[in-house]
Amino acid sequence: MPNIMKVFTGNANPEIAREICNYLDMPLSSAEVKKFSDGEISVEIGENVRGTDVFVIQPTCTPVNDHLMELLIMIDALRRASARRITAVMPYYGYARQDRKTRPRVPITAKAVAEMLMAVGTRRALCMDLHASQIQGFFNIPVDHLYSSPVMLEYIRKNLDDDVVMVSPDAGGVERTRAFAKRLNADLAIIDKRRERANECEAMNVIGNVKGKTAILLDDMVDTAGTLCGAAAKLKENGAKEVHACCSHAVLSGPALERLNASEIKSLVVTNSIPLRDKAERCDRIVVLPVGELLGEAISRIHSEDSVSYLFV
């Protein structure tokens, strides 16, 4: 059987799928993904996939439920069409914030999504900057976990390398921030914060010296921007010369854009893992870095059974 690769996409982020295919120098495969009048997802694969190595590009971003169902139904259709192997490529993994039980009677949604993906026939997963690395363990199939750090570090070195201090907006992100600080030969600071309820937090204290420095807040995602904007205000109070933020996934829901426009954050650097569409126009502080080449190289290496760890920084 010839080792043929095909790349499909749903409606979540066709732009990054085309970017990936341009890097791979191959066409985007045909699939019709639409809705019935009652809102149910309808999928029809437009070409033969029997015996092929299939990659489905679909971040599960807003509207999360629609895009997750698109991914599940596409994978089911491809499995029933006799694809040899199906890899779910999720530049952004939705439902990842509930990765453990922090209170009684709450779900572990990151595990539930992993179970659903495996149940419909996913044989491999490719993700980028998961909210928590242990999510890889929720799968009983191989998971390749990429990091956007190569493109983020390149941008910081070219544009922000001026007495930098890397800042973690909470205790959970210290490991990620320390890795950036080490590669940039920069100092490290931590924001001590207290979260009262979901999507609301109060920045409390800055641990580390930021006075007279360019502070760069680092996080895996920016949702309502409450954490980042509160942290930026604290950093300025503590004498930071400038405050920038780097976040892999630009969820930017609710009052996020209004908060960013009114905040001390001079620039917000994000990737195109989630489509911003008109959001970048409504906030001129947003800088979007493409990660299609990074994902494309990972897909190429998975298909040819080469090492993906080459892409790690």
Image: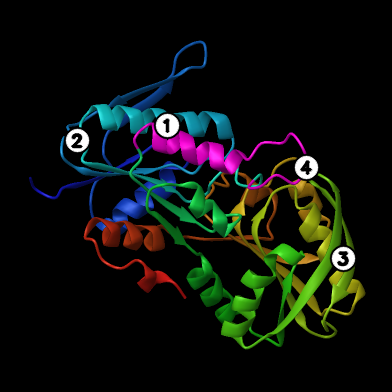
Q: Which residue is mark 3?
A: 233
Q: N-terminal of the two: label 3 or label 4?
A: 4
Identify which residue, 141 or 132, lies in the foreground: 141
The disc at residue 181 is: none
Q: Percent from the top left, x then y, of residue 249?
A: 59, 54
Q: Percent from the top left, x then y, of residue 113?
A: 52, 38
Label 4 Cα neighbours within 10 Å, binned few <14 / some 14-19 / many ≥20: few
Q: Secondary structure at mark 2?
A: loop
Q: CA distance from mark 4 to mark 2?
A: 45 Å
Q: CA distance from mark 3 to mark 2?
A: 53 Å
Identify which residue, 265 or 183, lies in the foreground: 183
Q: CA distance from mark 1 to mark 2?
A: 17 Å
Above/below status of 199 relative to 80 = below
Q: Which residue is mark 2?
A: 49
Type of amino acid under label 1: Leu
Q: Is residue 116 magenta?
A: yes
Identify which residue, 246 or 130, lies in the foreground: 130
Which mark is in front, 1 or 3?
A: 1
Left or right of 117? Residue 262 is right
Type of amino acid under label 3: Ala
The disc at residue 103 is: 4
Type of amino acid under label 2: Val
* Residue at x 7% of width, y 45% of height: 1
Q: N-terminal of the two: label 3 or label 2?
A: 2
Label 1 Cα neighbours within 10 Å, binned few <14 / some 14-19 / many ≥20: many
The disc at residue 72 is: 1
Which mark is in front, 3 or 4?
A: 4
Which mark is in front, 4 or 2?
A: 4
Stretch of the chain drawn in magenta: 99-121
Type of amino acid under label 4: Arg
Q: N-terminal of the two: label 4 or label 1?
A: 1
